[in-house]
Image (spheres, helix red, strand yellow):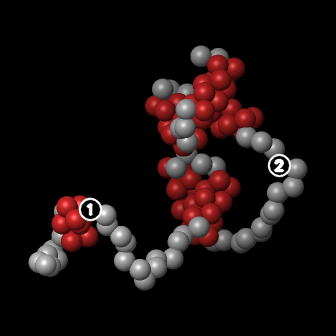
Amino acid sequence: MTETQLLKFINEARKRGFSDRQIKIALVHNSWPEKIIEKAFDSLNPKFKSKNQVSIFISDDILAELEKRAKRNMFNLGEQIEDILRRSCSRKTSSSKPEKIDDLFISYFSRRNIGKPVKKS
């Protein structure tokens, strides 16, 4: 597969609903070098004219941990930090309302009820 075919493969996989991470993992498992994969994704990602920038200063040990996590997740360092920030900002707060379970059968076998006594009505 040539680099042109690689770009077509990535676009087709995205159209079929695969995440960039899933695509990268599949390519690595099929012996594609990570540098070529990253270059292909960089060429496909839209270039932003204006992007917000934040400067932070972190210790070497935290930087090393972030780099390990980024490598494990197949991100570059910037993508990993962006992912962490996005996830921390999008966490939903738990509401005090109990979840509505439509099916009584499901409520009996729910993992939430393991170890709890079943109320008999």
Q: Could you tell whether 102 is left or right of 49 in the image?
A: left
Residue density around tag 1, few if under 14, some if 14–19, many if 20 or more, within 10 Å: few
Quadrant of res 83: bottom right
In the image, what residue occupies the spot 58% across and 41% down?
Answer: 20
Question: Quick one: SS at disc 2?
Answer: loop
How far from the left and from the top, in percent, is residue 2?
65, 17
| 89 versus 27 height, above or below | below
Question: Quick one: SS at disc 1?
Answer: loop
**Mark closest to the chain's N terminus, 2 or 1:** 2
Q: Nearer the viewer, residue 100 or 112?
A: 100
How far from the left and from the top, in percent, is residue 24?
55, 37
Q: Amino acid at mark 2?
A: Phe
Q: CA distance from mark 2 to mark 1?
A: 47 Å
Asked whether residue 39 is in view, the answer is: no
Residue, disc 1? 103
Q: Quadrant of the N terminus?
A: top right
Q: Quadrant of the C terminus?
A: bottom left
In the image, what residue occupies the spot 67% across and 37% down?
Answer: 41
How far from the left and from the top, in percent, is residue 23?
54, 35
Q: Amino acid at mark 1?
A: Asp
Residue, disc 2? 48
How far from the left and from the top, in percent, is residue 117?
13, 78
In the image, what residue occupies the spot 81% across and 44% down?
Answer: 47
| 71 versus 40 height, above or below | below
